[in-house]
Image (tube, grey):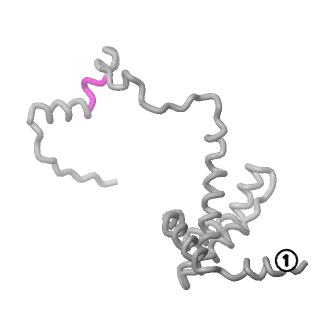
Amino acid sequence: MLAETATAATDDKETPATQENLQSRIEEDRWLIRECDLYYDEYKECTSLKGRFQQYFIYGETLDCNQWKKDYDNCCKWESSKDLKAADALITSERNRRMERFRAHYRNDIWKKRDSPPTDWDKPLPDWMQKRNENSFLAQKAKEIKEGKQEEASKSCSIM
């Protein structure tokens, strides 16, 4: 019992080494943190009537929107006072959200992932496709560039 209490007391205090470790992790993954307004917008969209209706339509039940609120609060703490724990919680949340989004991609065992492009990736297009595309706008512009007849950009205005 005394050992547990002593361990809990040392866990509550952050040593300078842990503080530096946390700070270096945050600096490395700072790009994951979005602007705070985006978290607030996601929360409002999630809790709106339209959002709830869409959730019920897609999933058959409404979703828990509390994580968006927590992320918004942590973002505000990070922006206002550079709270490292809030930033770490925010980065962890973003990583979890990202893993959830890519879960199907990572679990895909139908398609074999390539390490390099196919050997014949740059072979010429088939004749029928070249014939079909020979009068396209891009083909004409490519021909003009090759011949050096590129005209000055024409000025035009379209009113809708």
Quick one: SS at disc 1? helix
> In terms of depth relative to the viewer, which is nearer, 82 or 103?
82
Q: Taking 96 as reference, is 7 above or below it?
A: below
**Taking the image as drawn, is residue 76 in sight?**
no
The residue sitting at 24% across, 53% down in the picture is: 157
Quadrant that contains the N terminus = bottom right
Q: Quadrant of residue 109?
A: top right
> In terms of depth relative to the viewer, which is nearer, 146 or 28?
28
Residue 73 on image: x %, y %:
64, 77
Quadrant that contains the C terminus = bottom left
Q: Quadrant of residue 90?
A: bottom right
The residue sitting at 37% across, 21% down in the picture is: 120
Q: What residue sits right under mark 1 in the picture?
A: 3
The residue sitting at 29% across, 18% down in the picture is: 131
Give the amino acid at mark 1.
Ala
Part of the protein shown in magenta:
133-137
> In terms of depth relative to the viewer, which is nearer, 44 or 97?
97
52 vs 45, left or right, is: right
Residue 3 on image: x %, y %:
85, 77
The residue sitting at 20% across, 33% down in the picture is: 142
